Image (spheres, grey):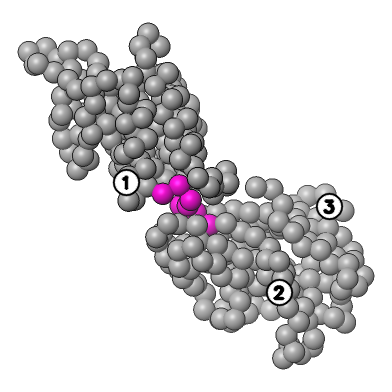
C-alpha cells in the first residue's frame, strides 16, 4: 500500500482511557500502529492535569485533527444499574470533536451504559466490542472499510512555489517579471470559499527588526476579485511579487491594486535590494482554518540574481 507523506497524512486523535494498571495504554499504542499502517498520522490523547496542559495539548491537537477515534472503556459499576460508566475525559474530548465537526469512529466496550455522558445527546453510532486483545485489529478493519475515512488529505491549505515560479507577460508595460505562490486546498471534499491572502510581516536579513504590515489583500493570478474559491484537491496562484526589468533590484509585493486607493500603500509593500527578505504569509477562507507560511526572496542587481523559495514547514 502506498503511504502518504507525513505532511499529507490525515491526523487521527485517539481518545481512550489511560489507566496504567489495565491494558488501555498498550491498546492505544497498538491502535496507533495500525493507523500508521493504513497511512494516517495518529496522536494518543493523554489526560492532562492542568488547564494550561489541556489548552496547549488536547485542544490544539483536536483542532489540528481530521478524525477522532473514540474508545469507551469500562469504568466502575454504576450504583443500582447493571452497567458501568465510561471514561469521563474521553467523553469531554468527544464533545469537543463534535463541536469541531470532526469525522468520528466510536467503539464501546460491552457493559458501558449506552447513554452515558454526552452520548445521549450526540448522534454517534458505537461499534461494540468485548475482547480488548482483538480490538486493534477490529478498529483496523472498520477504518479500512469506512467510506469517509481516507488517509491522504488535510483540513488545511498548503503553500508552495511552483516549478515555473515566474512569467514574463508580453502585455506588461513597463516590462516586468511576475512571481507566484500556489495555494493548494488539501481538503478531501470541501471547496475552500472566499479565500484571501495577506503578507503580514517582512524580515530583512541585512537590517535588524521586523516590518509589520497593514492588512491589504493580495491579488490572485488572472483575476481582480478580492476572494476566490479553490476546489478540493486543486490549487490557485497568488501574485507574490513582480520586478521591473529596468529596476531589477526592486520587488513590489502583489497586493490587489483594484481595491487599494492609497498611493503610499504601494511604497509600504516595496522591497529594495540587494538583500534577502523573509515574507510571512497567511491564507484565510470562510470554511478552512487559516494557514501560515514563510518565503525567502533574494534581490541582487540583475534579474538572474532573483531567488524565491518556500522556507520552514
Could you say where residue 48 lies in the image, as x and y percent from the top left? 43, 22
Dot 2 or dot 1, earlier in sequence: 1
Residue that protrudes farthest toward the left in the picture: 80
Taking the magenta stretch, the answer to whether it contains residue 218 is no
Quarter-of-image position of residue 109: top left
Q: Residue under circle 3? A: 205
- Which secondary structure lies at badge 2? helix
Residue 177: tell me if it is visible: yes
The front one of 289 and 105 is 105
Residue occupying the point 28% across, 35% down: 106
* For the residues bearing labels 2 and 1, Cβ distance under 8 angstroms: no
The front one of 216 and 182 is 182
Residue 54: tell me if it is visible: no
Give the CA distance from mark 3 to mark 2: 22 Å
Would you call the spot at circle 2 few (<14 residues within 10 Å), some (14-19), or many (20 or more)? some
Q: Residue under circle 2? A: 266
Q: What are the residue bounds of the magenta stretch?
A: 150-157
Could you say where residue 99 lies in the image, as x and y percent from the top left? 31, 44
Give the CA distance from mark 1 to mark 3: 50 Å
Q: Residue under circle 1? A: 146
Amino acid at each position: 500500500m502506498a503511504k502518504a507523506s507525513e505532511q499529507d497524512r490525515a491526523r487521527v486523535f485517539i481518545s481512550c482511557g489511560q489507566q496504567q494498571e489495565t491494558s488501555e495504554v498498550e491498546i492505544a499504542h497498538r491502535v496507533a500502529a495500525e493507523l500508521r499502517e493504513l497511512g494516517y498520522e495518529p496522536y494518543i490523547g493523554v489526560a492532562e492535569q492542568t488547564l494550561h496542559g489541556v489548552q496547549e495539548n488536547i485542544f490544539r491537537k483536536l483542532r489540528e485533527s481530521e478524525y477522532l477515534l473514540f474508545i469507551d472503556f469500562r469504568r466502575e459499576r454504576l450504583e443500582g444499574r447493571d452497567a458501568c460508566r465510561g471514561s469521563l475525559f474521553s467523553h469531554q474530548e468527544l464533545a469537543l470533536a463534535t463541536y469541531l465537526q470532526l469525522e468520528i469512529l466510536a467503539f464501546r466496550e460491552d457493559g458501558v451504559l449506552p447513554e452515558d455522558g454526552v452520548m445521549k445527546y450526540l448522534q454517534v453510532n458505537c461499534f461494540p466490542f468485548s475482547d480488548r486483545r482483538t480490538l486493534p485489529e477490529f478498529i483496523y478493519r472498520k477504518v479500512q472499510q469506512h467510506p469517509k475515512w481516507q488517509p491522504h488529505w488535510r483540513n488545511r491549505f498548503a503553500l508552495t512555489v511552483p516549478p515555473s515560479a515566474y512569467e514574463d507577460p508580453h502585455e506588461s508595460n513597463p516590462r516586468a517579471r511576475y512571481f507566484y505562490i500556489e495555494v493548494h486546498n488539501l481538503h478531501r471534499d470541501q471547496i475552500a470559499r472566499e479565500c484571501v491572502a495577506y503578507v503580514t510581516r517582512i524580515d530583512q536579513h541585512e537590517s535588524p527588526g521586523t516590518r509589520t504590515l497593514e492588512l491589504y489583500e493580495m491579488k490572485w493570478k488572472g483575476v481582480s476579485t478580492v476572494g476566490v474559491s479553490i476546489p478540493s484537491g486543486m490549487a490557485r496562484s497568488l501574485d507574490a511579487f513582480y520586478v521591473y526589468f529596468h529596476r531589477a533590484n526592486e520587488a513590489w509585493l502583489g497586493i490587489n491594486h483594484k481595491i487599494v486607493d492609497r498611493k503610499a500603500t504601494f511604497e509600504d509593500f516595496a522591497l529594495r535590494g540587494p538583500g534577502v527578505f523573509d515574507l510571512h504569509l497567511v491564507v484565510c477562507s470562510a470554511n478552512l482554518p487559516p494557514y501560515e507560511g514563510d518565503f525567502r526572496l533574494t534581490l541582487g542587481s540583475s534579474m538572474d540574481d532573483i531567488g524565491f523559495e518556500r522556507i520552514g514547514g
